[in-house]
Image (cartoon, rainbow, N blue to C red):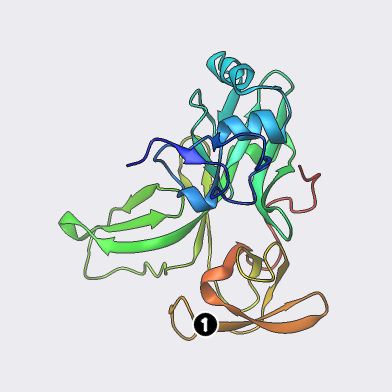
Amino acid sequence: MKKHLKTYPSPRFWHIKIKESEFTIRPSPGPHPLKLCIPLGIIVRDILKYALTLSEAKKILSERKIMVDGKVRTDHKFPVGLMDVIHVIPSDEYFRVLPHPVKILALSRIPPEEASYKLVRIIGKRTVKGGHIQLNFHDGRCHVIKLEDPFNHDISYKIFDVMKISLPEAEIIEYIPLDKDSFVSIIGGSNIGKYGKVLESPKTRNPEQLVKVAFDGSEKSIILKYLFPIGKESPVIKIDGEVL
């Protein structure tokens, strides 16, 4: 695996200037892929602007002043992605990473009480040893649901549904299905960063299936894989906070 990343081919939503330096920060392997994350060093230096140089950003992180999803992170290459919660300890500021129409991924300021949970989307589901069910989430986590009787249960979680989990314990608090009347965030395509309500239940879980969504006073068909449920009828997270 490459250890370096040139600035020009890096994702355009990173807040860096292409011609200032030949190389930029290459994210470490972690919860989010390179094209769907922002390195923590860039967040500290270029978005939050707590540092002027990468060396200053590294020092801030080494002093254990930044938390991601309830855990202190000191690696400036740590990948921060969709729905992650950032806590700046000295200033007691909280941010959630949300999709944005222009910035693709942006930090949205949230109140302290919202920093105790996050939303994770189910991207994989399988049966493991003992007949139990393992759910794989978009941020690299997995959760095993232990069943008393693997042949007789009412677990109906599906791919692209969402779980509200506690931080940092990662315990499931609430189940948010992708169904009719679900309030969703659009996380890809030309309508990225917009919010709306699902008008019809998806017939299948084909990622390329079109689903009708109402937003901005109109109805549009959005690809299923671009829909991220954030509430059963209304959002369970703050979506109108200050954007950085």
32 vs 14, left or right, is left
Name the residue type under label 1: Pro
Q: Residue furthest left?
A: 129
| Along the line of sight, the residue nearer the viewer: 122 or 224 | 224
Residue drawn where x is 69% and y is 70% of the image: 191
Residue 3 in picture, x, y percent from top left: 39, 35
The answer to which of 211 and 103 lies nearer the viewer is: 103
Q: Secondary structure at mark 1?
A: loop
Q: Which residue is mark 1?
A: 202
Q: Quadrant of residue 131?
A: bottom left
| Residue 28 visible in this rendered orientation of the protein | yes
Residue 88: x, y in percent?
Answer: 67, 26
Image quadrant holding the C terminus, namely: top right
In the rendered image, residue 167, in percent from the top left (x then y), is placed at: 53, 37
At x 48%, y 48%, the residue is 34
Q: Relative to residue 206, is residue 71 depicted above or below?
A: above
Q: Quadrant of residue 113?
A: top right
Instruction: Give above or below for 206 relative to 90.
Output: below
Q: Is residue 64 above or below residue 203?
A: above
Picture coordinates of residue 201, whole percent (x, y): 55, 82
Above/below status of 224 relative to 238: below
On screen, residue 216 versus residue 195, left or right, reads right
